[in-house]
Image (spheres, helix red, strand yellow):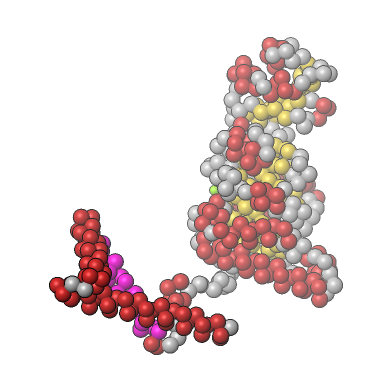
Amino acid sequence: MHQLEEILRHYGVEGTVEGEGKGPLIKQIRFKPKPGTKIKNITSSIEDIAREMGVRNLRISNVCEGGCIGFEVANDTFQTVPLEDVLESDEAKNAKGALPISLGVKIDGTPVFADLAKMPHLLVAGATGSGKSVGLNAFIISLIKRKKPSELKFVMIDPKRIEFSVYNDQKYMYMPVITDNADASEALELLVDEMTKRYELFEKSLTNNIGEYNEKEGNMQYIVTIVDEFSDLVLSDKTVEKKIQILAQKARAAGIHLVLATQRPSVDVVTGSIKANFPSRMAFKTASGVDSKTILDTTGAEDLVGRGDALFLAGNGELSRIHGAYISTEGIEEILKPYRAKVAPVLKKKVPAVEEEKVTITKDGKKTEKKKEFFLLSWIKGVWGWLSKTEKKKFLKWIWLLLVGAFVSSKTQDKSGALFDTIADNLTKTTKRRTYTTTRRKTTSRRRY
Ligand SMILES: Nc1ncnc2c1ncn2[C@@H]1O[C@H](COP(=O)(O)OP(=O)(O)O)[C@@H](O)[C@H]1O
Ligand SMILES: [Mg+2]
């Protein structure tokens, strides 16, 4: 009897092992349970079953050939799947669609390709070191192998400044690699504008999408936007999520696609609106079951083995285990060699807010007034900052006493309060004058509009 059959019997699960398949990262044991077996009995005891089997990272999958349950166990040694081999395979040659990307290989080592144009956008998550960046590089390189620079352009956003520098100065780039959050937000805005322009072109040419337009009119390029770590971007700028939402909802027909990756799949980053617009998702090994649930709506990614081991959730809800193919930075450089070219910046650098304020004040008088006001304010702030807490209290107390004294003396008409009387008088006059001016200004402005 197979060891697994015996162990499962301890938990009241009867059935037979139908076979085993060994891939580059994991071994899958196919177990056929007796009719009437509840899968719940297995899932609820998964940790104990793993302990009895003497393995870590045990995962079970109910989608397995012949009505079996797949028991997936990590191999003792991992094999790396070179991306070059995957891209030379028959599966690569037969891959259909406008933007086929290599997701990696199945458990048994068969290459898997999927069309990014159909997805139409992809969300990628996983803990640090789980294989996200290698995965993104595999997507990029598989597209570069398939499309010419005249057919495809990339927008790459890399706030960590380490992952995409190799792609700078490449004919495939729509703009230089972006490493700044403000620039990234501007780039997304630019993509929304580009999308709008493309829709106008479709309208003029009586076409509906990039495919039809290219057949009729000529060359419209696909634009694939890749963000390696979008959590800071979403959290630092409230408008980013909206822009992503607009692009995710409408950019598909215009040939603009997004691939967003994060190591922090928390609900404030992978929000409901982002999830709703990204039905295709890929989870590399996550830090916890909660993270797995956020990205895939189910646990399991926390039990992956790392090194590109992933769960892919297709748009139709099907979940499959995939091992990402590997390519080194040197390998990428080699492939990119023929495409070196200077890429012109397209983003306009925004003028800082302070400068804008100076520019908007046109009249000379106003300008000086504003400057003086700023000077006086900053001077008061400076002096206030030097004072200790007790000095501040004393100062405020004296001001208060002075004002109260001024009013009391003006009411009692006391001779000794003559000085305060004058101050109070002046204060009342100024207040009156101010009230009058405000009213007049209000009236004028009302008349003007
Ligand atoms: N598909 C893979 N095959 C083999 N090793 C991999 C694979 N993906 C990642 N690795 C290994 O894991 C390391 C971290 O991968 P990386 O993609 O940088 O992780 P992340 O971007 O998620 O932090 C890589 O340097 C490599 O050694
Ligand atoms: Mg990374």
Q: Which residue corresponds to the image point at 56% horizontal and 62% vertical from the top-left?
A: 184
Q: Quadrant of the N terminus?
A: top right
Residue at point 74%, 44% (across, down): 314
Up the image or down, 13 lies above or below 160; here it is above
In the picture as drawn, the residue positioned furthest to the bottom comes out as: 364
| Residue drawn at x 22%, y 63% as measured from the top left | 401
- Residue at the (70%, 37%) spot, across then down: 321
Judge whether 353 appears above or below 367 on screen: above
* Residue 82 locus on image (x, y percent): 64, 44
Q: Is residue 376 magenta?
A: yes
Which stretch appears magenta?
366-385
Q: Reply yes or no: does residue 97 show up in magenta.
A: no
Q: Residue 268, image x and y in percent?
A: 57, 48
Question: Mostly what secondary structure, the magenta segment?
Answer: helix
Relative to 424, residue 80 above or below: above
Residue 285 locus on image (x, y percent): 59, 38
> 336 and 175: which one is in front?
175
